[in-house]
Image: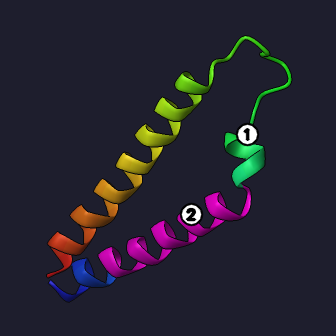
Amino acid sequence: MIVIKIGISLFILFWLGLGGMMLVKWNSLFGANPDDPSESPGSRTLSIAHIGAVWVGGLALAIYFLI
């Protein structure tokens, strides 16, 4: 049981680091794409919302199973 909790704790640290990396590189990851000028702001917003939902959901599940 303790091995599983350690693994989940390490996953949470990795997940928070990944989220921090996404915030640091925000513009290059989620900014306008020069190769695709026809990409609409709505499609970019949907992509950001989906990435955020997956990140928050993964963190919530990890914390739930840790407790």
Which numbered disc, 1 or 2, marks the residue that appears first in the sequence?
A: 2
* Residue ID for mark 2: 18
In the image shown, does 51 or 5 lie closer to the viewer?
A: 51
- In the drawing, what numbered circle is on residue 31? 1
Quadrant location of the C terminus? Answer: bottom left
Q: Position of residue 20 (x, y in %)?
A: 60, 69
Q: Which residues are magenta?
A: 7-25
The residue positioned 32% from the left and 84% from the top of the image is 6
Residue 48, magenta (yes or no): no
Q: Residue at x 54, y 23 (%)?
A: 43
Three-letter code for the amino acid on which mark 2 is drawn = Leu
| Nearest the eye: 20 or 5 | 20
Q: Is residue 19 magenta?
A: yes
At label 1, counting other C-alpha atoms closer than 10 Å, the crowd grade (few under 14, some 14-19, many 20 or more) is: few
Tell me the chief SS of the magenta region: helix
Q: Is 60 left or right of 50, judged from the image as shown?
A: left
Q: Residue furthest top?
A: 38
Q: Is residue 46 left or right of residue 44?
A: left
**Does the CB distance between marks 1 and 2 fall below 8 Å?**
no
* Nearer to us: label 1 or label 2: 1
Q: Look at 16% across and 71% down and name the residue there.
A: 65
